[in-house]
Image (spheres, helix red, strand yellow):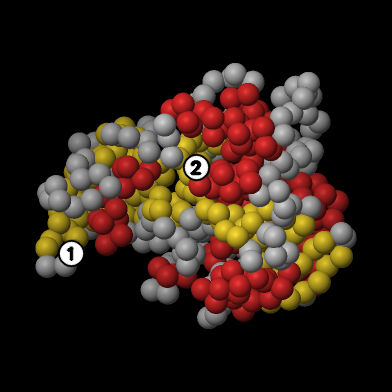
Amino acid sequence: MEIPKIDLRDYEYTLPEERIAKFPLEKRDHSKLLHFEAGKIKHFQFFNLPDLLPSDTLLVYNDTKVIPARLIFQRESGAKIEIFLLAPVAPTTVIPEIMLAKHPVTWATMIGNAKKWKDGEILTGRIGLGEREIVLQARLVDREDKLVEFSWDDSTIAFVDLVEASGEIPLPPYLNRKPEKEDKDRYQTVYSKKEGAVAAPTAGLHFTDEVFERLRQKGVQEAQVTLHVSAGTFQPIKVDNVLEHPMHSEQIQVTRETIEKLLNHSETVVAVGTTSIRTLESLFWFGVKLIEEKGDDFFVPKLFAYETREKVPSKTESLQAILNWMDTQQMDSILGQTEIFIFPGYKYRMIQGLITNFHQPGSTLILLIATILRENWKKVYQEALDQDYRFLSYGDSSLLWL
């Protein structure tokens, strides 16, 4: 199908600097919660969420865990080199596997002060792990692509342990501050489990054990997906026609248990965060890919959902196709990559509602929100500004219904 041009200027709004939440609230579930349904806006606090969801809801959240992806090395001259982990390259591109590696690993990175890092120079850091001191070395193996190999002197230690012990939490650039001690806990969801994200799925930061307990008492069901949020989530759109924006790719993993829950749940599905939506909609299109016999590699290209087709399979048909394929492959979970680009004109296939924070103007996430709210997105964002809502990662929340 021919996709009409989407003008970036239609998705801009003025966000005053003072409305960006620089720090989290002391109590996670005391953030504000804007409720939008059928054109009407109401205001609550996040601990009211169980009262706002139907008892037949399936709540889908992203259980990725943020890794302290900023590694700081100091040269003998005193100059500091900052290495920001972006994506694994070798010996595997599978994030869960490379985090558990106990031998040299190579990552694509961003490098601060790269000009000071001479070719062939090995950077060395010493990391305390209990009573042991581990020597971690970094070698620049490809300056152009910013590929860095890490090695260490103890084969009983996993790479994730070194990162957790020595790295800094990668706060979003728009916070314009260094991470503090409290960020290590507060920039994680209470249900974070699988290390690999370089940014938090921030819609989940408002949940507490108490909120989950009340949701369960009401009968709300839960399902987990994993999308390891990449730095591309902060990549600004720099083209007038947003369709030309190079959409970032992110690694996702979904278990058979979650797919079966989605298949058997015919009522309300609510995604916690834009990352959960990206995962769920990518899952749907992978099933379509299998049905249309367009390959069985779990990769959803940027505009695959917008291709012309006589008939789009149903959610049931798509999920059943995935389960049938998993049976033939004897798999309990599927791992893949998605570039899915969701913008106005897209039709959601997997959800009826979304819990999400308030996003940057002119971003891919605003496009995703506008796909749910349609022409109401500006009304909702203006209302949030008028009511002193806090914006972006550490900001307030919303519950939006299709």
Question: Quick one: 229 or 218, which is closer to the camera?
Answer: 218
Q: Quadrant of residue 164?
A: bottom left
From mark 2 to mark 1, how far is it between C-alphas? 39 Å
Query: For the residue marked with disc 1, what is the amino acid?
Result: Gly
Please name the residue shown 71% across and 48% down the image. 266
Question: Quick one: 117 or 274, which is closer to the camera?
Answer: 274
Q: Say which residue label 1 marks.
A: 128
Q: Is residue 311 visible?
A: yes
The disc at residue 73 is none
Please name the residue shown 29% across and 53% down the image. 160
For residue 139, side relative to residue 213 (left or right): left
Q: Quick one: label 2, few (<14), some, or many (20+) residues within 10 Å? A: some
The first of marks 2 and 1 along the sequence is 1
Of discs 2 and 1, which sits in the foreground? 2
Q: How far across and how far down the image is residue 142, in percent? A: 31, 32
Please name the residue shown 67% across and 32% down the image. 317
Q: How far across and how far down the image is residue 212, in percent? A: 56, 70
User: Residue 228, relative to residue 289: is it above or below?
Assistant: below
As helix, strand or loop, the secondary structure at mark 1 comes to strand
As helix, strand or loop, the secondary structure at mark 2 comes to helix
For residue 363, side relative to residue 164 (left or right): right
Query: For the residue marked with disc 2, what is the amino acid?
Result: Arg
Q: Quadrant of residue 300?
A: top right
User: Residue 311, relative to residue 232: is it above or below?
Assistant: above
Q: How far across and how far down the image is residue 253, in percent? A: 48, 43
Quadrant in which the N terminus appears: top right
User: Residue 192, relative to residue 47: is it above or below?
Assistant: above
Q: Is residue 17 visible?
A: no
Question: Quick one: 146 or 309, which is closer to the camera?
Answer: 309
Q: Say which residue label 2 marks.
A: 256
For residue 372, side relative to residue 129 (left or right): right
User: Residue 199, relative to residue 321: is it above or below?
Assistant: below
